[in-house]
Amino acid sequence: MRNAAIDSMTPSMPDFTAASVRIDQFPARRSTGVLLALLLAFAAVLLSPFYLVATAALADQGLRDAAATRPLAIVQICVGLAFWLILLGFPIYRLLDTLTRSRVVEIAAGQVTVADRSFGRSSVWSAPVADFLGLAPYLRASLSGVRHELIMVHPDRERSVLVAMAPRLMQSDVNQVAAALGLKEVAPQILRT
């Protein structure tokens, strides 16, 4: 899961002095659920004419005979149905994937273990804390506001891990987490390269 997709995490500022730290991370669920409900309602309205044509064809022998004499009309209806199913199916799948996505980060005994779960998939990877380049304070701005994040930066950008977020992080918080993890503070620009 991308760090930008994470909307909430529990705890938002873990106690890194503990022997083991577990962080649960989730994307925005409320807005995704609303979008999914709207898209499903839209899909039902768009696909209802296909349902009406199919039920009428099953009930009316004359319509079935007319369809048998003009197979191209059936092909056009099937192509239209396939078009709408593909056009609506992909965003529905993506929203379901986002709705079911979660990440668990565990830091214990000098090892970082990340378990990502989403719609029908899961992956787990781990790396020693020593493999990370450092801890980068990052300021993320969005329509919902500004938040401060602490990200453990890995040489492989996909493996950089969000470890803390708050409305405001002080330099003392960054120093405390860096000391507890045994990492140095790095510039946030390293995340963009």
Image (cartoon, helix red, strand yellow):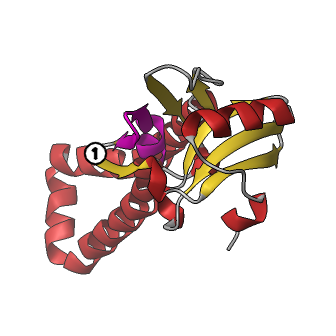
Instruction: Compare residues 189 and 110 and report the one nearer the observer.
Output: 110
Q: Residue at x 41, y 40 (%)?
A: 110
Q: Amino acid at mark 1?
A: Ser
Q: Residues within 10 Å of mark 1 (few under 14, many from 20)?
A: few
Q: Residue at x 34, y 49 (%)?
A: 126
Is residue 39 part of the magenta span, yes or no? no
Q: Position of residue 175 (x, y in %)?
A: 75, 37
Instruction: Compare residues 2 and 91 and report the one nearer the observer.
Output: 2
Q: Secondary structure at mark 1?
A: strand
Instruction: Compare residues 37 and 49 and report the one nearer the observer.
Output: 37
Q: Residue at x 46, y 58 (%)?
A: 131
Instruction: Compare residues 57 and 19 and report the one nearer the observer.
Output: 19
Q: Is residue 193 left or right of residue 52?
A: right
Q: Position of residue 52 (x, y in %)?
A: 35, 45
Q: Is residue 45 left or right of residue 79?
A: right
Q: Over which residues does the magenta segment extend?
A: 95-117
Q: Position of residue 146 (x, y in %)?
A: 85, 39
- Whether residue 27 can be seen here: no
Q: Is residue 153 left or right of residue 79?
A: right
Q: Which residue is mark 1?
A: 122
Which of the 4 quarters of the picture holds residue 145? top right
